[in-house]
Image (cartoon, rainbow, N blue to C red):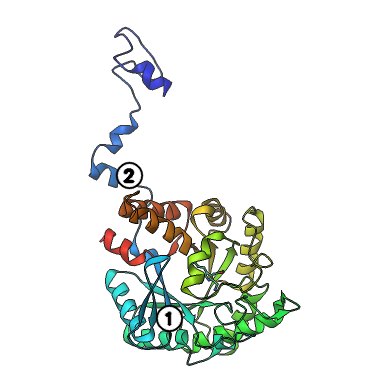
């Protein structure tokens, strides 16, 4: 800044020879040269945003012809299986390569057994989408919180989530998703050892080609609020601090990611995205592994709310946000904006 002021011809004289910058009319470095035109900016752009990197989450429930908008997430709907297939097909034609399925079961119980019901919405939607939208990747969320009557991510013993019996349930869920045709299963529960157990069980059952995207560094975040309305998965009491990570930690994220890679994860995820860009950057730098970031419900809701009030330019804020997640190092972005962003980039 001082160099520029010093060298500006309005402030310097022609006899002023500054050898660092070549004098007032010979400023050697003018970074603005590369920003002058759209073509020039495109030439030197470091981060490219492409729909190829997007995954689009869908909330599936029973019924037919049903599209129920989520109050805190404008543009996001709970969908019956037939509507989920239509939405998946629309996403594919927008250029989005994959969907991530969440389920809303009709009935919940203490152990989340709906998570591995072969006729449940996620399994039915996975089968239907694989059949009717060929080429689209189907990823399924593996967790119990949508399926337990108490809304916790596992089986409770004395009001605490018991790790190993919960993993047994997660393994059943992952197997049923693979059997329904899921290309990728994505455990989001943050129980210890689940990636390894799921990998072994998938292999033993002949699903060697089913990939695992682990929610490896998933933080205990306030930004999941709208999702819990969408997925009807808020805990009836307490919170998720006993298994999701403390937002203050990053070395711990590295240990979590290392464990999941060792256990056989194909893709590791950091979640949420925007408040954890430093975590994404460190994970990518340390492991150089396929890395996903989840641009979560609360991040989406904030942009939508501000846009609805006319306080921000939504298309620009959307693309700037997604670009920042890519720039931080994410290869894959899971976002409710996937279709809108893909259309904006077309
Ligand atoms: C758990 C799960 C959650 C999200 C994805 N998987 C919620 C939670 O941990 O409470 C949040 C996604 C979002 O906020 O968009 N099944």
Tell me residue 19's x, y (percent).
39, 16
Separation of marks 2 and 1 at Cα, in angstroms = 42 Å
The residue that disc 2 covers is 44
Label located before the other in sequence (2 or 1): 2
The picture quadrant where one finds residue 10 is: top left
Q: Nearer the viewer, residue 196 or 310?
A: 310
Between circles 2 and 1, the one closer to the viewer is 1
Numbered mark located on residue 156 in the image: none
Tell me residue 177's x, y (percent).
50, 85
Q: Is mark 1 within 8 Å of ligand 1?
A: no
Residue at 63% x, 84% y: name it.
Answer: 169
The residue that disc 1 covers is 60
Q: As displayed, is residue 35 above or below residue 224?
A: above
Q: Nearer the viewer, residue 219 or 29?
A: 219
Residue at 69% x, 67% y: name it.
Answer: 242
The picture quadrant where one finds residue 136 is: bottom left
Residue at 60% x, 82% y: name it.
Answer: 149
Verify CB contact (< 8 Å) between mark 2 and mark 1. no
- At mark 2, the secondary structure is loop
Q: Which quarter shows the C terminus? A: bottom left
Residue reaching furthest to the top? 15
Q: As displayed, is residue 143 above or below residue 1?
A: below
Residue reaching furthest to the right? 158
């Amino acid at each position: 800044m001082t160099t520029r002021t010093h060298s500006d011809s309005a402030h310097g004289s022609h006899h002023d020879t500054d050898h660092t910058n070549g004098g007032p009319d010979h400023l050697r470095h003018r970074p603005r040269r590369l920003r002058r035109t759209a073509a020039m900016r495109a030439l030197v752009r470091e981060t490219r945003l492409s729909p190829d990197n997007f995954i689009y989450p869908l909330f599936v429930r029973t019924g037919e012809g049903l599209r129920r908008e989520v109050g805190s997430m404008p543009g996001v709907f709970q969908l019956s299986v037939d509507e989920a297939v239509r939405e998946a097909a629309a996403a594919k034609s927008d250029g989005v390569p994959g969907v991530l399925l969440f389920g809303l079961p009709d009935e919940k119980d203490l152990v989340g057994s709906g998570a591995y019901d072969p006729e449940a919405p996620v399994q039915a939607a996975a089968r239907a989408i694989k059949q009717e939208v060929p080429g689209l990747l189907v990823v399924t969320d593996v967790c119990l919180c949508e399926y337990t009557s108490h809304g916790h991510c596992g089986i409770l013993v004395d009001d605490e989530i018991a790790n190993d019996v919960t993993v047994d349930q997660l393994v059943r869920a992952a197997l049923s998703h693979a059997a329904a045709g899921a290309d990728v299963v994505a455990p989001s529960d943050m129980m210890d050892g689940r990636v390894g157990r799921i990998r072994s069980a998938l292999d033993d059952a002949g699903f060697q080609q089913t990939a695992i995207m682990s929610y490896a560094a998933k933080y205990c975040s306030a930004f999941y609020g709208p999702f819990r309305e969408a997925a009807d998965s808020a805990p009836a009491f307490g919170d998720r601090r006993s298994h999701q990570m403390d937002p203050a930690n990053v070395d711990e994220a590295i240990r979590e990611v290392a464990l999941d890679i060792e256990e056989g994860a194909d893709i590791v995820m950091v979640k949420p995205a925007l408040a954890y860009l430093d975590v994404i950057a460190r994970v990518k730098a340390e492991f150089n592994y396929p890395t996903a970031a989840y641009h979560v419900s609360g991040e989406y809701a904030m942009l939508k709310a501000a846009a609805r009030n006319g306080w921000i330019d939504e298309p620009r804020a959307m693309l700037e946000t997604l670009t920042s997640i890519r720039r931080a190092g994410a290869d894959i972005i899971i976002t409710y904006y996937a279709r809108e962003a893909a259309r904006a980039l077309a």
